[in-house]
Image: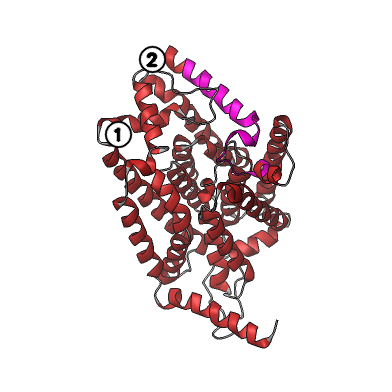
Amino acid sequence: MSLRHGNALVRARLALVAPFRTRPWIGWVAWYVFVAIAIARIHPRRFSSTFMAYLDAADRLLAREHVYNPLLLGDFLYFPISLLLHAPLTRIDPVAAAAVVLTISAGLFTWACAALASAILGDRARSDETIALAGAVLLINIPAAWFNFKGIQAQVPMTAAMMAASTAMVAARWRLAAFWLFVAIVMKPLALVMVLLCGALVREMRLPLIAAIIVVLLLPFAFIEWSYLISEYQAMGLKLWHIATVPALDWPYQADFSTMLREVGVQLPATIALGIRMAAALCTLALAWHVKRTGSRRSFAVAVLMLSACYITLFGPRNEFLSFIVLTPSLATLAGLLLMRNDADYRGWLMIAAALALGFAWSLTIDAVLKPAIVVVIYLWLAWTMAAPARWREIVEGEASEQVSPGEHAVAGVVAGNR
């Protein structure tokens, strides 16, 4: 690279970083403007295929009609308890109901991003550093949030609850972490990935998580006739098995490892794809266990969150092209953390580029290949890093002191992690 090009890159990098140093609130302003626009633009034509589907399913539950159709890939596939939350909303205007849910989801997501940024930076971080990091994370997530906000997707509160659980784990507040994972699985069953990882590896969380799953399954029996509900649980189980075992081609909105392989000419049989998902689950568990052995709560909490998000987006059944918001907040937070220590760290810039690419909706064909490919690279990098847990811990927690050159690097106070 020529000296001229090198100087141009330095100037561009400093131009991107400078506003967040001098005005740490800039990301927050952009985010709140975006949220206000999203709420103002709520319309049934924008959420008819998602939020309206939740309301319709809640209506069917209240009328004791079939909610789950095992023969369809689409339609409702969450736990019945989530419909109990939507049931009161069926009594008001759908636009008003959507506005209420979007406001709550956006607020929860905003708070969770700020809490995660604060937890990762540690106790020694200055308030302006925390504000700047959280604002940058929110700003980077506008593309991903835009398409999810339009449909009032349940992926947003599920992601926020998973981040809140990770934040609680940093502080060793295990029951609170289990509560947030309970909220996450109420929103979407996909959060069971993080539930199972935490249940397998964190002794203090096992009983609370078992209790959470029991409540998720049994609480609806307090409100709904038991024989009808049992039949619906059976239909739900058949539907989930159908989703997990059909070829990716059958769901046009799918974007995961199987659609990526399909586009390069590899069509996996359903049984092989299921076997890959199970093998990936064991590998993900092994990586999280490897990090757990370091004894650092902060490194482990971030690892579990990011590994869960990678697994959900790569190997989760019927992962859709808009569902990558489960990964982009933690990815952007880690990127911001690296750049606060050293704004020349190419890893941080690559993570930001990845988060933006995952956030935009390009086209069904491009998303089916590009987004899983990006997550594969991220997952392999995480695997390589976590294979040497000290290497992962250094990334998350940093060095006690860093030498920086004036005008080049921004140093954030970072604690050596909770042990």
What's the residue at 66%, 59% (across, down)? 392
Q: Position of residue 74 (x, y in %)?
A: 51, 31
Q: Is residue 270 above or below residue 232?
A: below
Asked whether 73 or 106 is in front, the reply is: 73
Depicted 302 relative to depicted 82: above or below: below
Q: Main secondary structure of the magenta part?
A: helix
State how far apart marks 1 and 2 are (Cα).
21 Å
- Region of the chain picked out in magenta, as a range: 231-258
Q: Residues within 10 Å of mark 1 (few under 14, many from 20)?
A: many
- The amino acid sitting under disc 2 is Glu
Residue 259 screen position, x and y as percent: 65, 42
Label drawn at residue 225: 2
Whole-percent x and y of residue 262? 69, 42
Asked where in the image residue 393 lies, by quadrant, the reply is bottom right
Q: Earlier in the sequence, mark 1 or mark 2?
A: 1
* Residue 70: mark: none
Q: Nearer the viewer, residue 71 or 325?
A: 71
Label 1: which residue? 89
Q: Amino acid at mark 1?
A: Leu
Residue at the image position 45 percent from the left and 76 percent from the top = 21
Quadrant of the snapshot with the N terminus: bottom right
Q: Residues within 10 Å of mark 2 (few under 14, many from 20)?
A: few
Count of all numbered marks drawn on residues in the image: 2
Q: Dividing the picture into quarters, in which one does residue 65 lie?
A: top left
Circles 1 and 2 in contact, beta carbons < 8 Å = no
* Element at label 2: loop
Residue 327: percent from left, percent from top = 55, 51
Q: Which type of secondary structure does the marked residue at label 1 adopt?
A: helix
Decide: is 10 above or below 144: below
Q: Is residue 251 magenta?
A: yes
